[in-house]
Image (cartoon, helix red, strand yellow):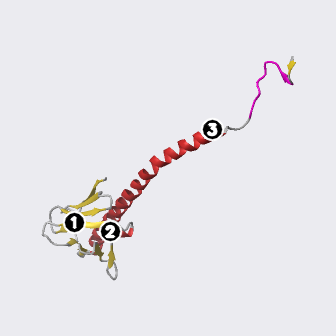
Amino acid sequence: MIENGREKGSMNHQKGFTMLEGVMVFAIIAIVAAIAVPQFRKMAINGNLKAAAKDMVSDFSYMRERAISENTSLSIFFDTTHHTYTVPYPGGKVKTPASFSSDINITGVNFTDGGTTLTFQTRGTISPPGTNTITLTNGRGSTATITVLTAGRIYVQYSLQ
């Protein structure tokens, strides 16, 4: 049966969204983005700190392996004033953790002898003997503490803000 040009009992099927539905979806997306963006920024800043620490650990591991394979002692020198360290690559490469981000600095070099030089011996051990630490800090106040033990074992502890 047809009434007013429509079959009785059938529904008028509209396609698309109303303006209100579109605005609501946009508002929800905006709220989620406002919450997520600062978290992503925090992750990126702390990710740069982790990358800098891993790069430094990689340099230490490489120097240890090279000292063993070349049967020679190799030293890494730290300059706490300029937040850099010098790795004995050919020509002596000066490196800085800030290469990952300008706000990452070497804020602490605590070696058992009070010095700023870490030497890898021919057997893979380090001098000065004991527990030696290097601390990296980023602009958020997060830290990465790299610990080098006498036997040459290296590990990192993070305190992320």
- Mark 2: which secondary structure? helix
Could you tell me residue 114's position as x and y percent? 13, 70
Residue closer to the observer: 35 or 55 = 35
Quick check: 143 left or right of 42?
left
| Residue with the mark numbered 1 | 108
Residue type, label 3: Leu
| Residue with the mark numbered 2 | 59
3 or 2: tag closer to the N-terminus: 3
Magenta stretch, main secondary structure class: loop
Residue type, label 1: Gly
Q: Residues within 10 Å of mark 3 (few under 14, many from 20)?
A: few
Q: Disc 3 vs disc 2: which is toward the camera?
A: 3
- Mark 1: which secondary structure? strand
2 or 1: tag closer to the N-terminus: 2
Could you tell me residue 88's position as x and y percent? 30, 77
Residue closer to the observer: 90 or 96 = 96
Q: Is residue 13 magenta?
A: yes
Residue at the extreme top of the image, as rendered: 1
Residue type, label 2: Asp
Q: Disc 1 vs disc 3: which is toward the camera?
A: 3
Cβ atoms at labels 3 and 2 below 8 Å apart? no
| Residue with the mark numbered 3 | 20
Cβ atoms at labels 2 and 1 below 8 Å apart? no
Q: Which residues are magenta?
A: 5-14
Q: Disc 2 vs disc 1: which is toward the camera?
A: 1
1 or 3: tag closer to the N-terminus: 3
Mark 3 vs mark 2, CA separation in Å: 58 Å
Residue at the extreme bottom of the image, as rendered: 91
Residue closer to the observer: 148 or 145 = 145
Residue at the extreme left of the image, as rendered: 113
